[in-house]
Image (cartoon, rainbow, N blue to C red):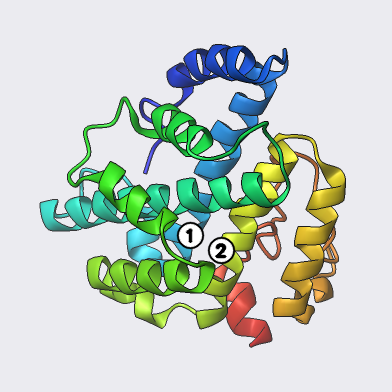
Amino acid sequence: MTTRGVHPAAAKAAAEFDRHEGRSDGTEIANRLTKNLTAVRESLLRCVLTPDQSNALDSMLLPTSQLRAQQQASEEIEAFMVAESAEAVRLFKLVKVADPWYAEWLKAMRLESWNPLGNVSERIAGYLEQSGDERRLQFSNILVATIPEARRAPLVLFRLLPTAVHLTTVLAFGDTKAAKKVRADQIKILPSITYCRQCHGELLADGKECSACGNPLWNRHWLCEID
């Protein structure tokens, strides 16, 4: 889906971040989170949709039922990402007190200008109460129920997704030490991500995506090729 309603909220979120944390880098952090979490969401949708559906993301040529399913999927992805980003902030102590402020702050920045089909706040609260494995399993089940084509996606994609959100989060905060730790965790999940001849599985500059493998969230073609 598009970034409708997200970027304008970043300025408001930045001011709130600086006030709450007593910092002056809220604008940079909010902008990086806005841009790069959207990129993760779009990458995931491209991975789980068929090529024709992926090429027609947001297209008015799609049947209403498919457009609705894509919006529902986008909302579920957003709810999951808010919870996983909050987990990364807690694990790596990126803010003074993570719970419950950060999740509410990120939710407002990502979703307050949307017109959601479902109760996204309820979905986020549910995810926050779960363990990482429970959260990942429930998310994959809901996504498959919303977009049946998702069941054809490589299972390892759903194992890599939480770490992709963690990586995006720590990089937004400029924590390169944490980013290296997350990348090491990803390589443990799928050692062959280092086989890419273009990026070699290395950390990329902020906002960059490898055109060959999709790093930081590997594309369907790459995952199937190395499976």
Number of other residues with Cα within 10 Å of mark 2, as a class: few under 14, some 14 to 19, many 20 or more: many
Q: Which residue is mark 2?
A: 161
Please, what secondary structure does the residue beneath circle 2 have? Answer: helix
Up/down of 68 relative to 100, above or below? below
Residue 71 is left or right of residue 193, and the answer is: left
Residue, far left: 64
- Picture residue at 58% right of the left edge, 38% below the top: 98
Q: Quadrant of the C terminus?
A: bottom right
Give x and y (percent) for residue 168.
Answer: 66, 46
Relative to 114, say whether 28 is above or below. Answer: above
Whole-percent x, y for residue 138 in the image? 36, 71
Mark 1–mark 2 distance (CA, rounded to whole Å) = 8 Å
Of all residues, the one furthest to the bottom in this rendering is 227
**Residue drawn at the location 28% of the way across and 45% of the way down:** 120
Callout 1: SS = helix
Residues at circles 1 and 2 in contact by the CB criterion of under 8 Å: yes
- Quarter holding residue 220: bottom right
Q: Amino acid at mark 1?
A: Leu
First-in-chain label (1 vs 2): 1
Q: Is residue 203 visible?
A: no
Residue beneath the point at 59% across and 35% down: 33
User: How many labels, in total?
Assistant: 2
| Residue depicted at 74% across the width and 41% down the height | 171
- Answer left or right for 145 relative to 56: left
The quarter of the displayed image where residue 173 is located:
top right
What is the x, y in percent for residue 126? 33, 56
Asked if residue 52 shows in the view, the reply is yes
User: Which residue is disc 1 drawn over?
Assistant: 44
Nearest to the observer: residue 113 or residue 224:
113
26, 197: nearer the viewer: 26
* Image coords of residue 112 (percent x, y): 33, 27
